[in-house]
Image (cartoon, coloured by chain):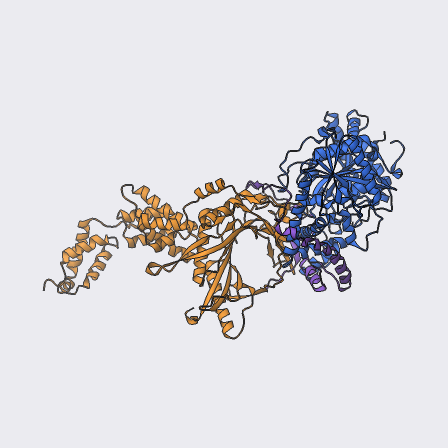
Chain colours: A purple, B blue, C orange
Amino acid sequence: MSLNSTQLKHVAHLSRIAVDEAQIPAMLQDLNAILAFAEQLQDPRLDHLAPMAHPLDQTQPLRPDVVTEVNDRGRLQAGAPAVEQGLFLVPQVIES
Amino acid sequence: MSLYKQSLAELRAGLDTREFSARELTEAFLARMGTHDGVLNSFISRTPEAALLAADQADVRIAAGENAPLLGIPYAHKDIFCTQGVRTTCGSKMLGEWVAPYDATVHQRLNAAGAVMLGKTNMDEFAMGSSNENSAFGAVRNPWDHTAVPGGSSGGSAAAVAARLVPWATGTDTGGSIRQPAAYCGVTGIKPTYGRVSRYGMIAYASSLDQGGVLAASAADCAIGLQVIAGHDPRDSTSAAQPVPDYSAYLNQPLAGVRIGVPRQWFTAGLDATVAARIEDALRVFEQQGAIRVDIDLPDAELALAAYYLIAPAEASSNLSRFDGVRFGYRCAEPRDLMDLYERSRSEGFGAEVKRRILIGTYALSAGYYDAFYGRAQRARRQVAENFAAAFAQCDVIAGPVAPTVAFDLGAHASDPATMYLEDIYTIPVNLAGLPGMSIPVGFSGLRPVGMQLIGAPFTEARLLATAHQYQQQTDWHLRVPAAYEEGSL
Amino acid sequence: MSAHSRWEAVIGLEIHAQLATKSKIFSGAATTFGAEPNAQACAVDLGLPGVLPVLNAEAVHMAALFGLAIDAEVALESTFDRKNYFYPDLPKGYQISQLAQPIVNGGQVVITLGEGETAEQKTVRVTRAHLEEDAGKSLHEDFAGMTGIDLNRAGTPLIEIVSEPDMSSAAEAVAYARKVHAIVQYLGICDGNMQEGSFRVDANVSVRPKGQTSLGTRTEVKNVNSFRFLERAILFEIERQIELIEDGGTVQQQTRLYDPDKDETRMMRTKEAADDYRYFPDPDLLPVVIEPATLAIWRDSLPELPDAKARRYQSEYGLTPYDAAVLTSSKETAVYFEQTLGALADRLPDQVADAKLCANWVTGAIAAQLNKTGLAIGDSPVTASSLAQLLVRIVDNTLSNKLAREVFEAMWAGEGEADAIIDARGLKQITDSSAIEALVDAILAKNPDKVAEYRSGKDKLFGFFVGQAMKAAGGKANPQQLNEILQARLGPPGDQA
């Protein structure tokens, strides 16, 4: 269940986190020490148990279809890194 | 008695009889904060002007005859709760300048109750850690021993309460982050049943494990704080529908006949001998009051640890994807393109522990690994919950250690994060099962406090608080204040 | 595909329909189209730290109605999953969707291909339909190398309807898409406005040698916002893939965009195996439960759906299957037809309203004008009520069909109601027999040689007399009466030598 360098880079890419080459050995060591705990999960007792997503034994509450939020754009955008004409700006995204 | 040592009930009485005003009370605690927090570093943001304003408003309400339990009484918020108009950092550079545009439900309730917030406390970044050493705002010192950690992730709240810079503080607990720092700092803390306290505005680490709670000097004080913040919130789909009982009214339920379950498997070689001894002492006090000690089985602690260290990072890896430099928070300088914006903002904004957990979590959910990791971990979770259910067939309250050791030295685990994770072995199972858990101070090992954990079946906070309260009627560990933080009369 | 009879196409469609709720699926912000950027993006929609989703009851209701309408199984318990990926218009870095336990499973849609006697029905199976939240929008122009993100649309409820790859031609795909479009409109759960993006169709297209059972590599075609473009895009893609394979190449699994200006598809991005969405159950949401009794009430509340309505038009009004299909092809058209028929019935209470007449005018004159002007029937300048009044004047013989067309054109051009135009232009039909007889006698008197020719056998001259008489009548003679009177006056052709 341990991670190698290629997998680490792939996972880092999926997470949009940069890892430079120098950091990789130490990171692998740390991550694999943690993943070693996962050996415990091979326990065959678990084969027959249903996964538990939630400790609460409740079902999803439903909200009535009513508009409750008003335009609060000024306040919600106040801390934004880059805004123009009400739009959040990011470096251009090329689609094709 | 000096103001800083008074219980919430005593402070209430003092305010209501006009012995002192809310403003005077607030000033007193602000002064202590000014004197002591340079060393402790338990606060990230201090809000003295707003606090005095709130205190003045409380004085008006008190003068009008209102006597709500927390009205005019200072407290501190773990910096994980969104407080409108006030910086909310989660201990991270990613939110280092972020001013929340809205209030967490917990904060709204405390405001309505007239409580006076003195500031936002330090914490492990995004609640990931057990020592408060993972904060972008520096480590926090343990008031009992400045070379020790206060515990984490609610280290700032625990230290602030232990040093009596505030009479009580909010915290959050995902794998032990209220109970363990409470134990390390010799204060009382309660993590309620999952769903008891609203998570709306409580920045998420692991959504199915996170729960907001209270740290204070005593169970009686915790009861008062919990009363205000607990309850159903329609803005949180995972908020429990159960009505909230009057916790304070149940505190004096006697211990006679209460079955205290003590898990055999928790008292092994891994548990520090002095910690074990202090807990045995505490159990004797319970027995003296008529409680019945029952030895129970609570196996699978390693299984719980494995499950937690896959589930929590998995949920966190997804919850933290919103921190991308686009709409709020830290953005790297001059991003070259979108990928650069994401990668550099996140790599520069997050600390090492957070990045580790995101990577583990992403891996655990990734194609081909879901069943082996996350899927399996959720089954282990059910096993843990079933183990507790079986245990509660034989006892009313489970008692045992909070952590295998007392507070460790600052820097002790720096080179080996995995060993840090073992600190949570007794607290994690409680979060997996969604149960309520408390930590109460039961003595010392040298300078460093020892805490005992009390665990209950779902929604039995009242019984837990009462059990703790009865113990605290017979002992005074909870009244101790570190010598460095005592002072002449205020 | 006649030129490529050794190939067959396999097509599946994924349709994203925006549900017509007032508020978003997980927050109380409004969903109205066209607001100022980010004016309808509340804290929850922006994915700010600490916010949480709460499910809109109406989204569940609408999704369930769709399931019931296509005879699918509506799950009494369904769950939400997170689909994780990074994109600026996806604020949380994940989309809340349903993977493991969707709200609708299975189902089918019947489509009709061709018309008249060669019309065929085909059943297209639906794999599933699930609830999910829409993302925001990116605006690429106007920002000097930056892209602007508007999150108003983020959080709008969608149902994603996935078909089995049961379609084998662009025509079938379009018929299916149109049918689903009609169904969601009939149910009132989606306004179907493709220009505004409330009904989006993606096509998965592959080809294989005829008779082969395994599937070829498929591509996904996106960005088609009209049925016409959908058809063209699929046709292009099928041809492209066939040519590629015949030239010795292999089809790459990709996402392609349709370019309507060049009428071609081009690659958008390679569908990497590394598109790892890391689905897992959303821990902020609990299982969605529908009570059987509630579902039963919803089932009973279903309106008359297109197929049932078309069958009723045939049995109750005697319309042809083709006309019934055209009239029920969209809710607006059916409503227009029924309103016209209803108004006609109200105004002529002593007779059974002529449904076929209404049908002819709606599928004929109205449809032609709508095609020409590109208007939707709801925006027709001739309302159902106005059309009904024109039809009244046909039924009561005020107007011949030919003149009625003239009046219709004038109505469409905005000259007013039928009666006003008839009066203004003096178009009332001449139905007075003696007047027509007088006209006919005058024409016959003016053309004695032609009369003689007709009577000696040149029967084609009948048309000449009709034309002349009609001209003299200013086009207003009732054609039937004119015919009868002319025949009477002329006698049978070739009888008198």
Percent of width and height locating residue B411: 84, 51
Tell me if residue B225 comes above or below residue B305 in the rendering: above
In terms of depth relative to the viewer, which is nearer, B111 or C272? C272
Q: Is residue A18 left or right of residue B5?
A: left
Percent of width and height locating residue C341: 34, 46
Which quarter shows the C terminus of chain C?
bottom left
Percent of width and height locating residue C314: 33, 51
Query: How many numbered tags mark residues here?
Result: 0
Q: Residue at x 70, y 50 (%)?
A: B303
Q: Is residue B264 visible?
A: yes
Residue ranking furthest to the left: C497
Which quarter shows the N terminus of chain C?
bottom left
Q: Is residue C420 visible?
A: no
Q: Residue at x 48, y 55 (%)?
A: C126
In terms of depth relative to the viewer, which is nearer, B285 or A16? B285
Percent of width and height locating residue B83: 71, 41
Q: Quadrant of residue A58?
A: top right
Residue ranking furthest to the bottom: C247
In terms of depth relative to the viewer, which is nearer, C415 or B121? B121
In terms of depth relative to the viewer, which is nearer, B1 or B362? B362
